[in-house]
Image (cartoon, rainbow, N blue to C red):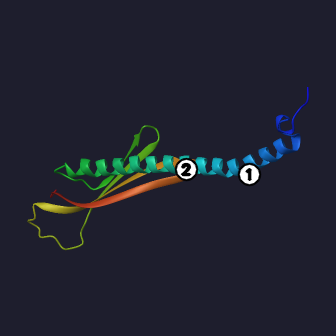
Amino acid sequence: MQTRAWQRGFTLVEVLVALVVAMVVLLPLQSLFSLGLRAGALAENTSRALLLAESGLELYRARLHLVPGEDIEQIDSRYERRFKVQLWDFLPQPQDASLRPYLVTVSVLWSEGPRQRNITLSALMSGAAE
């Protein structure tokens, strides 16, 4: 039985060249894919930290009496939320004022691999005078 040229298949050199070309194309794609996954995880963690900071501000917004000071709480063993309340004395306040302005700052910290990341939000709020 005779073998025709088109029935012989590929030579070893052709197969090796095809593998090298495939590697040259696929390796950068794999790098891009892993970079995209890391960026997606960072965006998800940053969004969650922002939500935690916003909800922390809302916790203090709901309080009638604000007391200057600092507080720290751990959330999900991944995030740390820090609160800081300080009297905002930008303008002189009359002695008979029933409300006082306070600067409330909420910071959310978390680790992303070897890097420490944080988000900080601040708001002016009024609270009952002490």
Q: Is residue 69 left or right of residue 80?
A: left
The location of residue 35, given as percent across then percent down, is: 58, 51
Q: What amino acid type should be assigned to the residue bearing mark 2?
A: Gly
In this rendering, which labeled residue sits more in front, label 2 or label 1? Answer: 1
Q: Name the residue beneath numbered marker 2.
A: 36
The location of residue 91, given as percent across then percent down, is: 20, 74
Q: Residue at x 87, y 40 (%)?
A: 11
Image quarter of the C terminus:
bottom left
Who is closer to the viewer here, 126 or 39? 39
Q: Are marks 2 and 1 in contact (CB under 8 Å)?
A: no
Residue neighbourhood size for the residue with mark 1, other residues' Cα within 10 Å, grouped as few (<14), some (14–19), many (≥20): few
Image quarter of the N terminus:
top right
Q: Residue at x 31, y 60 (%)?
A: 122
Total tally of numbered discs in the picture: 2
Whole-number angstrom distance, CA of label 2 to CA of label 1: 19 Å
Q: What amino acid type should be assigned to the residue bearing mark 1?
A: Val
The location of residue 85, given as percent across then percent down, is: 29, 56
Please identify the residue farthest to the bottom as the structure is shown: 91
Q: Is residue 34 left or right of residue 53?
A: right
Residue neighbourhood size for the residue with mark 2, other residues' Cα within 10 Å, grouped as few (<14), some (14–19), many (≥20): few
Q: Residue at x 83, y 34 (%)?
A: 7
Please identify the residue farthest to the top as the structure is shown: 1
Please identify the residue farthest to the right as the structure is shown: 1
87, above or below 66, in the image: below
106, above or below 10, in the image: below
Q: Residue at x 25, y 47 (%)?
A: 59
Q: What mark, if any, has residue 24 been given in the picture?
A: 1
Q: Is residue 128 left or right of residue 45?
A: left
Query: Considering the numbered disc 1 on the image, is that residue within a helix, a strand or a loop?
Result: helix
Q: Earlier in the sequence, mark 2 or mark 1?
A: 1
Please identify the residue farthest to the left as the structure is shown: 96
